[in-house]
Each structure stands twice: as structure tokens, then as C-alpha cells.
Amino acid sequence: MRYRSTGRKSGLTSLRGAVLRGLAPDGGLYMPAEIARHSPQELEEFRRLPFTEVCFRVVRPFAAPDVPEEVLWQIVAESINFPVKLVSFSPGLHILELFHGPTLAFKDFGARFMARLMGYFVRGESRPLTVLVATSGDTGSAVAHGFLGVRGIRVVILYPSKRISEAQEKQFTTLGENITALEVAGSFDDCQRLVKQAFTDAELNKRAFLTSANSINIGRLLPQMFYHVAAYRQLPVASVPLIVSVPSGNFGNLTAGLFAKRIGLPVAMFVASTNANDVVPEYLSTGEFHPRPATQTFSNAMDVGNPNNFPRLLDLCRGRLELVRREIWGHAATDAETLQEMKSIHDRFGYIADPHTAVGVLGWEAYKREHSEPAQGLVLATAHPAKFADVVKRAIGTAPPLPDRLAAYLKREKLSLPMTSVYDDFKQFLLAQ
Ligand SMILES: *Cc1c(COP(=O)(O)O)cnc(C)c1O
């Protein structure tokens, strides 16, 4: 598979080129140059084969010829070594738990796969590769854990000071080794801006070997197709039209869903479920896209005012609003609605949902109210409720049980370094390494 840029000014490149660069030279995002569909028979087979085998078959066309099959198999098997669980609330509503990986959020899929892919691609490089990543919470821990101990790679994580929970922060600021965390005096958008500016700084890029681990990296999106397929495999009835509600921030998750649909997965509609940071639902209703500074909410991993995968969504729909509307329906939830929904999910189904998942359920319910044709809803549960214990406590009165993995991190010492939101300070830091 060759990769092209959404900017359409850069030439085609290999998967290796796309993964190591992150962003294309023209500032666009890398896209698979063409996506082959699996036949209905192959899809039916996906419902029977072991999951590792299915993941391997899904990603193989995207990785050939850069990654030999036996290496790819190993990358898949090592990165997706935890379960995807489907919980059915009713025949018409299912929750797909994506949080059984080491950092208890769905980003483990992308981060673990990409780290191993990059590790393979930099073998034999003389300079160490520096992975830059801006995080609003969960990316940082998933990326840090994904890369921890990977040789030839160091990771620099930028996160907004005091805007993420202690549980999130402790998961990536206490690791040491090849992982450095920068606590930025600013917002997530500031962190994202610093990273973007570093990639477009020609002088810096001559002196340092940089790449990105944000969801702009195609290496993170490819493995996110796996669980869309996993859901399809586990649905009790696959014949009722499927509506997939995706709690969204940077829209990497939803983009991966569109990729999965392009390879043949039958999804009737995606719901772009957001919190108050609703630039995409607004685009869907008004046709105008107005990025703006992020607003803080309870579902803070989705506090994104300028979703970085939006160009990919547009590109997949040929830049045409009416085509986007045919595949994606938008809904934005307030914090008050989110809290109330967490309580209602607990009351109705005895299930503790994290705030992001609750935003997803709200999106599905809103869709259902406006569309009467038969459909089944699938909500992606993106984080374990214990990662958002304060919000859960506020919603249902009790905190969820703390998994041992998380409890161990809370006891460890934070090792992050302070950083301003001024680009020159960040650049000096990178050059001094
Ligand atoms: C990152 C994240 C999201 C948003 O995913 P995008 O791919 O950025 O849209 C949703 N929920 C949780 C828990 C997350 O960590």
C-alpha cells in the first residue's frame, strides 16, 4: 500500500515513510492511496476466525510490502493481547468495551501497534527517533506504555497542566526510562500547536529526527479498524442495520471506523458524539466548520476545539457535505446531560459508564429518537470508569472499584518537567536533548 497526503501536493510514500514522518511535507495527513474491499464471504469468515488472524488479515494490505508478514503477525499478536468485550444492554443496544488494555482506554490499540511498527522501521537508524505527542489525557499514557523500553526511540509527551485527572497524569509521568513528560502551562490546544510547529520547523527537523504519535499518525489509525471488526464479529445478529456511536475528540476513532467501512464492514451510520466541543456536529448541521479553543468538560479526553483528523473525514467523503451527512450524524451533549445519563445507565442497566461512554450513549439515543427505522446501536466504550472516578462518584454516588493496575500508579512519584506554551522554549528543550 502506498500513502498519499490529504494536502494533495506531496507525492506518494510508503507506510514506513508515512509512519516515521507523521505529517506529510505539504502539511496534510497521510491516507491509504486506495482501500480494497473484502468480499461478504470474507467478512462472514471474520466472524469465525480467531481475532488475531482477523486483525492480521485486516491490516495486511495496508502494511505490504513494507512489513514482512511474519513481522506483521508478531506486531499484531503482541499489541492486541487483551480482549474486546461486547456488553448487550438490550437486543438493540450494545456497548463495546475497548478499555481492557494496560492503560484502560481504547488508545492502547493504536499506541501499542504503532510503537511496535515504528520500532521495526527504525532498526538500523543511527540517530534516535523522538516521538512527540500532545495529550489531553489518555493518549499520553497509552503512548508512553506502548513505547516504554522500545530501543532507538524516545518519547516526549506534552500535557496541559492541571487539566487532566491525577489517575491519567500518574500513568505517564512516573515511568522514566525513554519517556519524558512536559507539563505545559496552557491548554491541550497549546500542546497540540507546539507539536505541530515543531514538525514544520525546518531547522529543528534538520537537527533532530522527529515524529508524531498523535492520531494524525496513520500507524495509530490502522489498528483502530480492528475493534470495529471485533464488534461486527460479536454482534448476536449482524443483519439489523448497525449504527455506531463514537465518542469523539480528534476524530481518529471515527476515521478508523470509516476505514473499516471502506474495507467492507456494514455500518449504516456513524454518530459523531461529542461533548460541548461540538465543531463537527455543528459542521454537520450548518455546513460550516469553525475550529475554536477547547472548552473543559467532564469527558476531557474529548476536549478538542480543532479536531486534527477532520481533513481525513472530509477526504474520505470527497470534501462534500452531503456525502459526509450520508455517513455521519452528529450529536453534542452537555456536562449536565452526561452526568444524568451516567446515572440513568447505572439505574437502568446496572452498568457503570465513564463520561465519554455516556456521551456515546446519548448520541445513540438522540439518533434513535429522530430515526424510526429498525437499527441496532453500538456505542464504543472508550475508557474504564475508574479513570474518571470523581465524575462517576458525582453521577452515581459511589466511586467505581479501582483496578490494581491504576492503584499501583497512583502511589508512584510524578517525574514531569515544567514547560511554557512558548514555542521557542519547547524548541530549546528539544535541541538540548
Ligand atoms: C481519545 C479519547 C476519545 C476521543 O477519541 P478521538 O479519536 O480523538 O476522537 C474518546 N474517549 C476517550 C476515553 C479517549 O481517550
Image (spheres, helix red, strand yellow):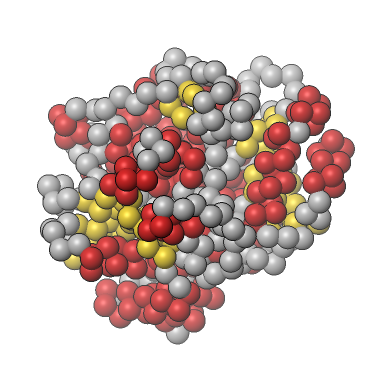
Q: Position of residue 413 (x, y in %)?
A: 73, 61
Kindly indicate the quadrant of the structure image that contains residue 201. Answer: top right
- Location of residue 205 in the rendering, given as x and y in whole percent from the top left corner: 75, 28
Q: Residue at x 49, y 24 (%)?
A: 4
376 is higher (above) or lower (below) than 313: below
Q: In x, y percent, where is residue 22?
A: 59, 32
Left or right position of 429 against 16: right
Residue placed at 53% from the left, 55% from the top?
A: 290
Q: Is residue 216 visible?
A: yes
Count of numbered badges drawn on the protein: 0
Q: What residue lies at 16% left-to-right and 31% top-to-bottom?
A: 40
Q: Foreground: 7 or 66?
A: 7
| Residue that appears at 30% across and 34% down | 262
**Which quarter of the image is occupied by the N terminus?**
top left
410 or 416: nearer the viewer: 416
Q: Is residue 52 left or right of residue 339?
A: left
**Left or right, 144 with reference to 130:** left
When the figure is inspected, residue 20 is found, relative to residue 326, above or below; the finding is: above
Above/below status of 258 relative to 8: below
Which residue is at the front of the view, 389 or 359?
A: 359
* Up/down of 58 relative to 107, above or below: above
Query: Farthest bottom residue?
Result: 397
Q: Is residue 398 visible?
A: no
Q: Say which quadrant the C terminus sits in.
A: top right
- x and y, in percent, of residue 378 in the image: 27, 56
